[in-house]
């Protein structure tokens, strides 16, 4: 049995279970690990038709998108928002669990 590269396997998982993909992204956002977030977004871009398709929908140059989602990428908020929108997602602000300021 031939094994799949990890990124391909994760893209397939995110494609087949979008709710799981959202849970992974939200979990990473809670922990604040930017490099991990960019890896998952790259895998999700692959799941949502590939970097070329996501770049077109986000109105970004594919090379720029590859750089943005690289482990050393540092996307601007506008780029991150456009990438997420191309995948049918958006950033949201939520109160911290148990926060007295949430009300």
Image (cartoon, grey):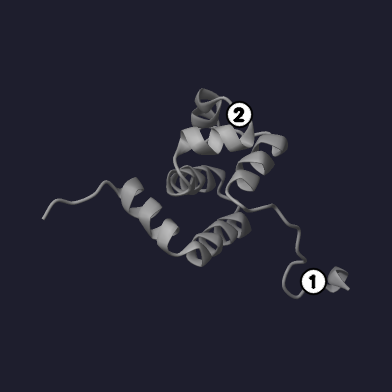
Taking the image as shown, residue 32 lies to the left or right of residue 77, namely left
Q: Is residue 98 above or below residue 29?
A: below
Instruction: Residue 23: give its label.
Output: none
Q: Is residue 33 shown to the viewer in this render?
A: yes
Disc 1 versus disc 2: nearer the observer: 2
Is residue 51 placed above or below 3 in the rendered structure?
Answer: above
Q: Is residue 42 left or right of residue 101?
A: left
Position in image of residue 82 (x %, y %): 66, 40
Say which residue appears at 76% left-offset and 58% top-offset: 93
Q: Is residue 87 left or right of residue 77?
A: left
Residue 70 can be seen, yes or no? no
The residue that label 1 is drawn on is: 99
Q: Residue visible at 72% across and 72% down? A: 97
Is 50 above or below relative to 23?
A: above
Q: Earlier in the sequence, mark 1 or mark 2?
A: 2
Where residue 44 appears, as percent x and y from the top left, is: 48, 49
At numbered mark 2, what does the secondary structure look like: helix, strand or loop?
loop
Residue drawn at (61%, 52%) of the image: 88
Observer-nearest residue: 31 or 24?
24
Real-space CA distance between mark 1 and mark 2, rounded to the nearest whole angstrom: 37 Å
x and y, in percent, of residue 38 in the image:
52, 42
Q: Is 7 left, or right, of 57 in this rendering?
A: left
In the figure, residue 15 lies in which quadrant? bottom left
């Amino acid at each position: 049995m031939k094994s799949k590269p990890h990124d391909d396997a994760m893209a397939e998982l995110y494609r087949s279970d979008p709710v799981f993909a959202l849970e992974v992204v939200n979990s990473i956002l809670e922990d604040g690990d930017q490099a991990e977030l960019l890896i998952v977004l790259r895998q999700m871009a692959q799941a949502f038709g590939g970097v070329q398709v996501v770049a077109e929908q986000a109105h970004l140059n594919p090379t720029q998108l590859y750089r943005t989602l690289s482990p050393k990428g540092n996307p601007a908020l506008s780029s991150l928002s456009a990438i997420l929108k191309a995948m049918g997602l958006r950033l949201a602000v939520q109160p911290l669990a148990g926060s007295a300021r949430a009300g």
